[in-house]
Amino acid sequence: MNPQLQILIALQDILSLIREAKDPSQKRALGRMGFKMTNLEALEQTRENLEDQLSPAIRSQYARAKKRYGRIVAPVINGICYGCFVKIPSAIDTAEDRNQTLYRCENCGMFLFWVEK
Amino acid sequence: MKLSEILAPRRIALDLKAKTKDEVLEELVRLLRLSSPARKTLVKTLLAREELGSTGVGNGVAIPHCRSLVVSKVLVAVGRSKRGISFKSPDGKRVFLFFLIVAPPVGDPGEYLVVLGTVAQAAKILAKDRRIKKVKTPREFIKLIKEIEK
Ligand SMILES: [Zn+2]
């Protein structure tokens, strides 16, 4: 896997966690099951550490997507970008270097990740 | 939703070798049979989740969970440790039984919470059931869950 893509995926997972920890209804539902989410600072620190590992060009594309959508990587499932639900050109969807080369959706600009089935 | 219906014998390990929190998360993630980069990313996300607050729920049970881009559907794995592992549980007890839950960030947003709730409920009952220590095979474990769910 492309090393920068791997960092972006880790960042996307952390952003999902941060969103969950900040969402009052999710927090309540999880709290009722016995799960506490208190140490948000540690997560923000992990996010910053990961951001520092991005190359300058990718970091600015990351910042744009994060500001616009709150998300940065869209999974591709059955040829569809799950960031904008638009079909990926089939030449890219079937490319042998997908996940090795960093691709972005031509429509929404999010980084693309082909999820293992 | 029934827990017994989403469990798969190949994702159940009844004799975990791990001795630490990091090791047990790695061992549980291994049961999901993902590629190596996906596995590494998922372990990192689960460790970050633990930093946010331990997923140990007390009485020797922990339910590590997160949403992650590396999976395409909700996956559950189970691990039992005979010695128990220190997991920063609120009651300070070592953890003997682990349920790992990983969900994709897309799809039905309620499904993840339903699975978590179902597991949390079953885990609470299992923690007090002595039969959990005697179960010898993954199929026996699923059979026990079925009995609890009756
Ligand atoms: Zn898109």
Image (cartoon, coloured by chain):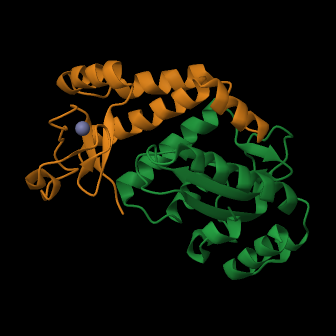
Chain colours: A orange, B green
In the rendered image, the quadrant that contains the C terminus of chain A is bottom left
Left or right of B51 on screen, residue A8: left
Q: Residue at x 16, y 46 (%)?
A: A101
Q: How many numbered tags mark residues here?
A: 0
- Residue B138 position, x and y percent, is 68, 77
- Residue A35 position, x and y percent, is 73, 37
- Toward which corner of the image does residue A70 lie, by quadrant? top left
Q: Quadrant of ligand 1?
A: top left
- Toward which corner of the image does residue A83 lie, by quadrant? top left
- Residue B148 position, x and y percent, is 84, 69
Report the front residue among B90 and A36: A36
Q: Residue at x 62, y 55 (%)?
A: B100
Q: Is residue A32 above or below residue B124?
A: above
Q: Residue at x 60, y 62 (%)?
A: B77
Q: Is residue B97 above or below residue A13?
A: below
- Toward which corner of the image does residue A32 lie, by quadrant? top right
Report the front residue among B26 and B104: B104
Left or right of B104 on screen, residue A74: left
